[in-house]
Amino acid sequence: MEREVQPEQSTTPVELSEGRIRLRRFRFPVLFGSLFVVMLAVVGIDTLVAPLPLLALPIGLGLAAAGVLCYQKLTRHVEVRDSVPELAAEKRWSGLGRGALLGFALFCTVLLLVLVFGGFDDLSWGSFAGFLGLIGMMASVATMEEVLFRGVLFRILEERTGTVVSLVVSSLLFGATHLVNVNATPWGALAIGLTGGTMLAAAYTATRTLWFPIGLHFAWNFTHAGIFGIAVSGSNDVPNGLLHAVLSGPSVVTGGSFGPEASLLALLVCLVPTVLLLRRASRAGRILPRPRR
């Protein structure tokens, strides 16, 4: 079977100033720190406009586009790259669309299983305006988390340690960041690392584009909050989505206070696409070995 050649990640000119060489040498802390600050600013703006859903929609979408632009500009400058293939324009809409369909299907499957196992207590109508506002908010959050965790952390760590180590480390760190949420638990953080972190890293590995995991991440969160009105990842704020679902029952079914992402059902559902994506990546020659020293 023909093996796919890994696209070149960066191009370094023959002559660089000492400052540019030093900047490129410290590319990980520079990129991660810069984009982390951008993400905090995005979260702050989202929080400010959240009470105004019709304003949150365009602002959130604008922040998502700004996050992509920041990543492209920073990686070109800091890493001295001629192009940013993981955000290639020709893969944008197909990647976002396929990822969104998968994310929507996966979360609906989780809730269907919760219903089957008696975890639904009530389902009522919510707010259409809130539904629209959450499109923008979830788009900006998903975009920033993907460029930070998959675009910077996973990609650069993978170059240094190989795919397997990068997959494990980035997933655990992704889960650990959710410990700051009000209703976070150690199991919830581990679960979201295993479900979200590993699945999204597998989505990037299989496609070598950030568009697919961005679409997947957005649709999972938006279906969670924007459609069913369930708090995301241990958040204390109940989103004003299109519907308002109330879950009750054993934590193994509902995820308890952390939400469905901490349920055993979500873990099992997300395991299927994760395995399939990694299998696809392996067959395409996209699993990178640990570099020899």
Image (cartoon, rainbow, N blue to C red):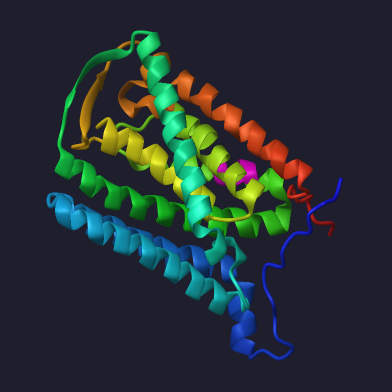
Total number of numbered discs in the rendering:
0
- Most extreme residue toward the right, as rendered? 1
Q: Position of residue 223 (x, y in %)?
A: 34, 35
Q: Position of residue 175 (x, y in %)?
A: 47, 39
Q: Position of residue 283 (x, y in %)?
A: 78, 42
Quadrant location of the C terminus in the rendered image: bottom right
**Up-down relation of residue 284 to residue 16 (above or below):** above
Quadrant location of the N terminus in the rendered image: top right
Q: Give the side of residue 131 with respect to residue 193, left or right.
A: left
Q: Is residue 138 visible?
A: yes
Q: Give the side of residue 222 with respect to residue 262, left or right.
A: left
User: What's the residue at 55%, 71% (across, down)?
Assistant: 75
User: What's the residue at 55%, 53% (across, down)?
Assistant: 150
Q: Nearer the viewer, residue 264 or 131?
A: 131
Q: Give the side of residue 216 with respect to residue 52, left or right.
A: right
Give the prevailing secondary structure in the magenta stretch. helix
Q: Which residues are magenta?
A: 167-171
User: What's the residue at 22%, 41% (across, down)?
Assistant: 131
Q: Is residue 251 visible?
A: no
**Up-down relation of residue 124 to residue 279 (above or below):** above
Was residue 245 drawn as part of the magenta stretch in this picture? no
Q: Position of residue 48 (x, y in %)?
A: 17, 56
**Up-down relation of residue 25 to residue 238 (above or below):** below
Q: Give the side of residue 2 with respect to residue 276, left or right.
A: right
Was residue 168 drawn as part of the magenta stretch in this picture? yes
